[in-house]
Amino acid sequence: MNLLHYLKYFLFHGVGLISATAILAGGHYMSGGLLLVLLIYIVGDAVCGNDTSTPGFKHPGILTAQLWMALPLLALIVFSAVWSVSPGDPLGFGEWATRLSGYDVVAARDATSFGNHLATLFLTGLMIGMIGTVPAHELTHRTWDPVSMFIGRWLLAFSFDTTFSIEHVYGHHRYVSTEEDPATAPRGRNVYHHIVASTIKGNISAWNIETKRLKRKDQWPVSWHNRVIRGHLMSALLVAAAGAIGGWQAAAYFTLCALCGKALLEIVNYMEHYGMVRNPKTPVQPRHSWNTNKRISSWTMFNLTRHSHHHAQGEVPYQDLKPFPDAPMMINGYLTTLIVALIPPLWHRLMTPRVLGWDRDYATAEERQMAARANARSGIPLLRQAADSAGAPVANIASNAF
């Protein structure tokens, strides 16, 4: 039975291989691949229930290797996408794939419509977020392991987001659920605003964290020692590689895919901490993150879903995270909740009762006061009504409230 617990995390790699195959098959297979991935998560989470198991693992090296395997898998997916919009047959890849499979991938690519290329852009962006950022999130927490950090930062380079390895570990985990945290969305904010605001503020935060580190070491911030600069150069190298493969069109296409992957990260940030409040002087508790134990999301995202435990103890490896079934829960699994977040009226309709439930069932007395002030300026009628009932002032809001 223990073997099955190792194998379940290979579903992650299966989703990646399905995506690469759909991209190379061209035509309607591209759109079908995107639809299939969405159905795997949305239907899978709906029918497969929750996973609350916490098995012990005697061979954690296998689990680390599964994370490392994400880099070649993501490289294959992105190369396939770049090749699919490139003129000719760069590196003879299409000819090789045709000989290997017996399926004429070059002819299929050349017959692919704009709509299917658009579907591939979203599918590749989704994979950059899932195959790239999800394992990179785990790997870049392992600051003591240079191999994991190297692989994690290269995975993040595909979404132009190597700053995540700095801001997330040293900023977000310290300030989560406070207004000092760029990744925590205040009540009433829509996801599109959050994508832009969190990206800008997150990059500024990462730069500030890195310059402080370098100053402590008496090193000049504008130098090769700066991990922010090195990280952006890594992403620039990937754009240049796409251009070398397929010209400016391929470079532009990859750039759009990368930006989709980056947006996906910020949407996930939005989902994971929306509306939470906390005094930054108090410890982070499981109640300060939205959690979910949906089985398919958990198995294919290395337990990213167990976010409540992750933020309470950020050093715990993914396989040892506990489900915390009594933590505040998301709407559903990750991809389902993500799609809801993309529709702001639906998001606020479904999340506002959960936010008010958090105030009632999870918040401390201090946090209830902060929540009342947050509700007062949220712009959401039901939240403002709750604030009025609590007697919260709209003006003169404390600095530690949203």
Image: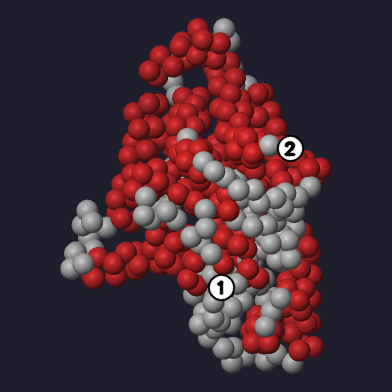
Residue 177, image x, y percentages: 57, 72
Camera-side residue: 285 or 401?
A: 285
Camera-side residue: 90 or 6?
A: 6
Total numbered labels placed on residues in the image:
2
Q: Between disc 1 and disc 2, whose residue precedes?
A: 2
What amino acid type should be assigned to the residue bearing mark 2?
Leu
Neighbourhood count class around disc 1 (C-alpha, 10 Å): few under 14, some 14–19, many 20 upward: many
Q: Is residue 254 visible?
A: no
Q: Is residue 288 visible?
A: yes
Q: Secondary structure at mark 1?
A: loop
Residue 221, image x, y percentages: 23, 63
Camera-side residue: 299 or 22?
A: 299
Tell which residue pokes out farthest to the right in this image: 47
Quarter of the image for the N terminus: give it: top right
Residue 69, image x, y percentages: 47, 35
Q: Which residue is mark 2?
A: 39
Residue 27 in the image: above or below residue 327: above
Neighbourhood count class around disc 2 (C-alpha, 10 Å): few under 14, some 14–19, many 20 upward: some
Q: Is residue 181 left or right of residue 209?
A: right
Residue 121 in the image: above or below residue 221: above
Q: CA distance from mark 1 to mark 2?
A: 34 Å
Question: Residue shown at 74%/65% (left/top)?
Answer: 326
